[in-house]
Amino acid sequence: MNTNAIRIVGFEPRWRADFAALNIEWLEQWFEVEAYDREVLQHPERYILAGGGYILFAVDEADRALGTVALMHLGDGIYELTKMAVSPEARGLGIGRLLMDEALRLYRSLDARELFLESSSKLAPALALYESVGFRHHPAPRAGSHYARADVHMIWEPQKD
């Protein structure tokens, strides 16, 4: 697969099913799909986009969604990096990093004050990616967490130049 041909695009309704499928695949592999996951994945316009959030996709030259990530606005300038998933056949090719770089570029363009994520200690490659771009560990679980699986709470704290 030629990753040079991968482009990052915003949400379009035609990718709603891919958003759900990409996330459900890894959730079923590692955990279980929680009720909150199903609700958000079935209604991303309501739960992510309507509140001022964003959904990004890594798309190949054949217009197939290979990965996705979302920035969910929780109000008061706080965003959650969430629903990041890469298709099994595209893992290890740098798709996650492309999505992360674009999500951080987008976040920096917003009038925002905090970007956090919740994850699991089972997901070592994901945690390494998060740490490499400036996410730092904080006490977990995060107050108000929606996820039973979350035993990692990280906040983006980029190095100051």
Image: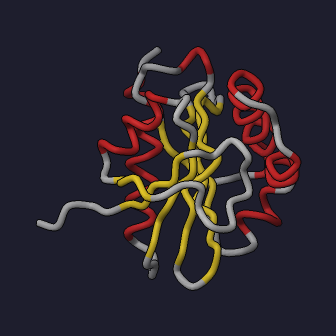
Q: Residue furthest bottom?
A: 76
- Residue drawn at (79%, 45%), measured in percent from left and top? 16
Q: Nearer the viewer, residue 89 or 115?
A: 115
Q: Nearer the viewer, residue 7 or 105?
A: 105
- Residue drawn at (71%, 74%), measured in percent from left and top? 51
Describe residue 74's horizontal placement relative to residue 116 as left or right: right
| Place of residue 85 in the rendered image (x, y in percent of width and height, measured from the top left) | 61, 35
**Image height check: is 6 above or below 102?**
above
Describe residue 131's horizontal placement relative to residue 20 as left or right: left
| Place of residue 55 in the rendered image (x, y in percent of width and height, measured from the top left) | 63, 54
Q: Residue furthest left?
A: 161
**Image height check: is 7 above or below 78?**
above
| Place of residue 142 in the rendered image (x, y in percent of width and height, measured from the top left) | 59, 61
- Residue drawn at (37%, 27%), measured in percent from left and top? 4
Describe residue 54's horizontal placement relative to residue 16 as left or right: left
| Place of residue 48 in the rendered image (x, y in percent of width and height, measured from the top left) | 71, 63
